[in-house]
Image (cartoon, rainbow, N blue to C red):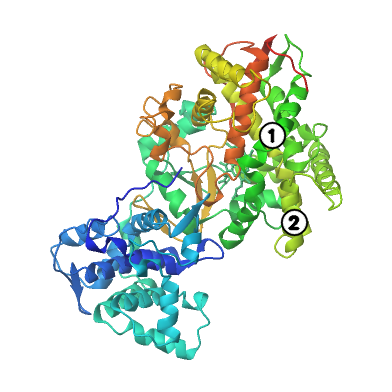
Amino acid sequence: MTGDSRDSDWSDPGASSLSLPEELLLALLDEESGYFRQVPGWNLNCAMVGAVLGELSLLGRIDSDLKSLILFDSTETGRPVLDPLLREIASETEQHDVRYWVERLAPLSESVISHALDRLVRRKILDRHSGDFYTFTKRQQRGETPPEEDPLAGEFVKARLTRIIFADEIPGPRDVIITGLVDACNVFHLMFQIDEEAEERIKFVSRMDVIGRAIAGAVTESVVAPSLRRPSLTKPIPSVSLRDLVFNRELREGRLPAGFAILAEKYGPVFELRLPFRQNLIVLAGLKANQWAHRMGRVYLRSKEYFEGVDKAYGVSRSMHSVDGADHFRFRKSLAPVYSQSTLTRRLDEVYDLARTHMASWDVGATMPVQTMLRPLLNAQSSPLLASIDTQDEIVDALEYKVRVLNVGIVKSMPRFMLKTPSMRRRAKATQRIVDRMQSTHTAKQRVGMHKDVVDAYLALHASDPQFLPESDLSLPLGAILMTAMYMGDQVGFALYWLVKNPELYERVTAEADALWANGDPGEDDLSPDRMDVTRRVLMETLRMSPITVMSMRTVMNTCVVEGYELPVGAQLLIAQSATHYMEEAFPDPWTFDIDRYAPPRKEHLGGGYAPFGLGTHSCLGRRWAHMHMAINLLMLTHHFKIELARPFKRMPMDPMPSQSPSNKIKFRLVEQRHELRA
Ligand code: HEM
């Protein structure tokens, strides 16, 4: 999912300056971590509404004394960040105080944040990183302001606050309001060293202007003790009946995205699953729910509890998957380069050689179950590329252990003792042997002149800060490298299945492959989007119809409201991000394998419903690597072999847990070898 650009730039005279909600967001951004300073959800919502009210008062639309908020002018401003709230105020006949409005409008604050962030990115003030982390752009850090913009827009709000608080500069009306709001969010002490004198100055500045005082006061009161009872504003979450679970054919047959889409159609975007022997799960499904999880999940949700079973099984205290906030961004920043697509495409010769060497071990005429055929093919490449070792001798055991860990620790479909059976103990040792192999082949001396791989990146992070990533926490991330072979192998298996079922597409992919390999192995520039257009779109459609990761689990850490439903602190969430893949509103005629959905003018994947690589801060760091690597494998398979299904199926058989895999009942036959397999 990408952040969509919803609002056009303002057409009014204030268009070049930043609005108060935007300034407030900039004040809350921690440049170091790429995260917004942790302000509890309700407090942030109230402060954002306060910022909108402040901006509306500066634009002369509303005024307030300390008792009531008065609407002067209901004419819309043309700013999507302000107008929905102005409309709401205009629709009310009775007069209320500012506090009432802060609390009443708080549920709308998420769209305010969303619009404000979009605009800060468009204005090149913030850079949006994968996973929706934000940092100031280089241009902004250098303090450059394009000539068409108000110079104030380019000035960090933090710099202004510094001068006002520590150099007694006289604040303007905007500064008074911002000072009050940042104070209400309780983050001044996170931004500056605040002594008694500074504290007094902040209080003094916040009280300098009547409207600023009214807004900051209302926000502070609402934060401390909301007067509107929030639950009364929300709807009860419906529970899915046992009947609807049991008779849901898609869920029963393991087609989880379609199964969740059916439930969402009946129960709406938020519903509860009551399952025996485990805490109830609240499911989020649908376009709006995805958008919320993508943008707002960072503020309200965390992954610690969901992943701690896996951390425990590998004996680590935490991992990139289970941390959130600044530490998580640090993990991603350190590791992003080694997971990038260019790291893969710089090593294409190795990719081709490793793939061909493995394919050469296949017998023409043989029949192979899908997982058995494709997981080792991908592992033959990804272990050397990501970890510079061969793991083919141990991979089956290591993957079986990891699958069991996920079933016990995350899906919770098996009791804990199932990890301690004799066969599982043996398989756990296989994983440990691989991790030892990775470490013993990555001493500084051995790595001179080698491509930096994922193991190097983890070991470097450990060496640079052993407190942040202790040696005792290395086994999980190193072991997890192997999972990529399973994910990509299964996903290529799904793609091959769809190709064989659609002979016309099979021929078009083969034609692309033959053209790319017509003059020897294609180089980085040859693998351009237009020369592998059909292959890319076949993969995209496969990831829609048969995504291997269907959902993400999270715990609610701050009470929040999604689509009118309150999610209480501690609730376990199942974000069924791929349910939209089977919803008409996102993908018309969703049961048809149709690669033209991704071509102009349709481009259905840009509508916010396409989420095969997850949503929000933990979304797949290797998505571009994975896409390119899978496309290359699909091309090579069709270039070298004519492949058929050993027997047809009416509906594709699936293994739904812990990730969605094509069942090994699906077998492919290598009918003919089309091109030589020289290594
Ligand atoms: C078919 C291929 C793949 C799919 C569908 C996929 C999907 C996903 C999804 C859905 C997540 C998010 C999980 C969550 O939110 O809890 C994720 C995380 C991740 N993926 Fe992938 N992935 C694939 C392949 C890869 C590959 C090949 C790499 C590495 C080269 C990779 C690296 C990662 C990493 C490092 C994370 C953790 C990100 C974080 O926690 O911040 N993935 N992946």
SS for dot 1: helix
1 vs 2, front mark: 2
Residue 28: tell me if it is visible.
Answer: yes
The vertical placement of 478 against 641, above or below, is below
**Residue at position x 57%, y 24% from top?**
495
> In the rendered structure, are the residues bearing label 1 and label 2 in contact, judged by CB atoms less than 8 Å apart?
no
Q: Quadrant of ligand 1?
A: top right
The vertical placement of 522 against 25, above or below, is above
Ligand 1 neighbours mark 2 (CB distance < 8 Å): no
Instruction: Give the quarter of the figure containing the C terminus.
Output: top right
Q: Nearer the viewer, residue 342 or 568?
A: 342
**Residue 672 badge:** none
Residue 659: tell me if it is visible.
Answer: no
Going from N to C along the chain, the mark reached first, 1 or 2, is: 2
Amino acid carrying mark 1 in the image? Ala
SS for dot 2: helix
The vertical placement of 367 against 454, above or below, is above
Q: On the picture, is 281 further left or further right than 374?
A: left
**Seen from this angle, which residue lies furthest bottom?**
197
Question: Which image quarter: residue 53?
Answer: bottom left
**Residue at position x 61%, y 10% from top?**
647
Label 1 sits on residue: 485
Q: Nearer the viewer, residue 642 or 587?
A: 642
Residue 514 point in image, percent of width and height: 61, 16
Residue 144 point in image, percent of width and height: 44, 65
Q: Nearer the viewer, residue 74 or 161?
A: 161
Q: Nearer the viewer, residue 515 or 457?
A: 515
Label 2 sits on residue: 460
Residue 439 point in image, percent of width and height: 82, 49
